Image (tube, grey):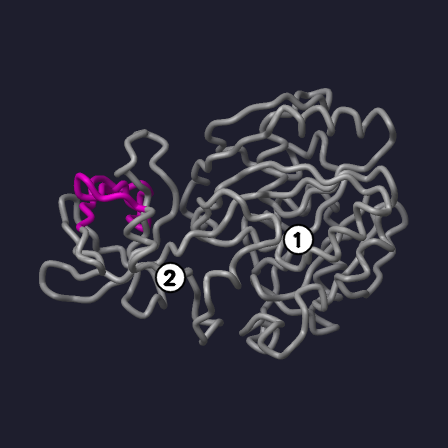
Amino acid sequence: MTALTFDLPPRLEAHEPPEASGRPRDAVRLMVASRADGRIEHARFRDLPAHLRPGDLLIVNTSATLPAAIGARRADGTRVEVHVSTADPDDPRPQRWIVELRRADGSGPLFDGRAGERLRLDGDATLDLLTRSTPNGRLWHAQLAPGATLAAVLARSGRPIRYSYVPGRWPLSYYQTAFAADAGSAEMPSAGRPFTAELVTRLIAMGVVVAPVLLHAGVSSPGSDEPPYAERYVVPATTARLVNAAREWGGRVIAVGTTAVRALETVTDDDGTVAPGDGWTDLIISPERGVRVVDGLISGWHEPEASHLRMLEAVAGRALLARCYAAALEHGYLWHEFGDSHLILP
């Protein structure tokens, strides 16, 4: 159980990106919390260089966001929406995917899918539901019709996944980070969203090192009755060497997002040594397991009892994390992918 149970008022949900009101991405708020002394500071994301130091190593996720929501029609004519989550870890064929079936307006999942059911996707491709990927039927193993490719289908008819707290539709570019290079995430690795090219340049100029990992994020966190699902990751050899070197020179390893933590910790030995690797990870990071190489974390704000809070507790400690969330609620920080940010330092 996490120490964080709270009510999130609708007024603290970010309903649109900051650019919609003429502000740059790095204008969002940033709470800075230090485990060393328990201090909490309030800043703007553009102030990040003041809270890092030369020799720190930022680990960023280079996954780009897919237009992973697509309309579909059931055999009886009912309109639904399909959210494409990840490639199927049990089957390497390019037509096999893990998908979520949702109401036509995207407002919630549907649990009445049937094995063998055929959906006709917008753009006229078909998708067959094969077997349940989760016991409750929220996620399915599914297969595109032979000859169809997901990239082509989504490029033609897909759109970014959005939830009810974002009433407007925004272009796919609003769901990409400054580090996006390899398309594959169902939902944006949003901790990296506030970075701008100018901010990254300032960080590099002051001696902060930036190193990439890749983790293709699936649809939103599993429910309480679902096991965490596997996601594809790559930790390049150069990144592994930089992390190990940073530990030698006294730099702090700061992960940008829970996805970067998951990828990096997957290839970290008990003694904190990092090796290159790629594949599928189902690693669960909890306070009991702890983190072995990540010293700090840049994150957004997570919903009550979200599974990611367990990871944040592993990085921040229970008492400090609870104080941070209480302060975020008190000071009106904004939640979700277009919201404010949180920096946890060791």
Q: Nearer the viewer, residue 16 or 289?
A: 16
Q: Position of residue 108 (x, y in %)?
A: 35, 64
Using residue 168 as the reference point, say whether residue 107 is left or right of it. Answer: left
- Asked whether residue 11 is drawn in magenta, I would say no
Q: Position of residue 303 (x, y in %)?
A: 56, 60
In the image, which residues are magenta?
126-150
Give amino acid for label 2. Answer: Arg
Q: Residue furthest left?
A: 76
| Residue under numbered circle 2 | 159
Q: Nearer the viewer, residue 329 or 205?
A: 205
Q: Residue furthest right?
A: 37
State the image quarter where residue 197 is shown.
bottom right
Quadrant, the C terminus: top right
Looking at the image, is 35 positioned above or below residue 248?
Answer: below
Q: Nearer the viewer, residue 286 or 145?
A: 145
State the image quarter where residue 146 is shown.
top left
Using residue 54 as the reference point, say whether residue 136 is left or right of it. Answer: left
Marks 2 and 1, the one that precedes in the sequence:
2
Q: Position of residue 339 (x, y in %)?
A: 62, 66
- Asked whether residue 133 is drawn in magenta, I would say yes
Mark 1: give few (<14), some (14-19) or many (20+) Cα within 10 Å: many
Q: Position of residue 129 (x, y in %)?
A: 20, 45
Looking at the image, is 128 positioned above or below residue 67?
Answer: above
Checking the image for residue 299, the label placed there is: 1
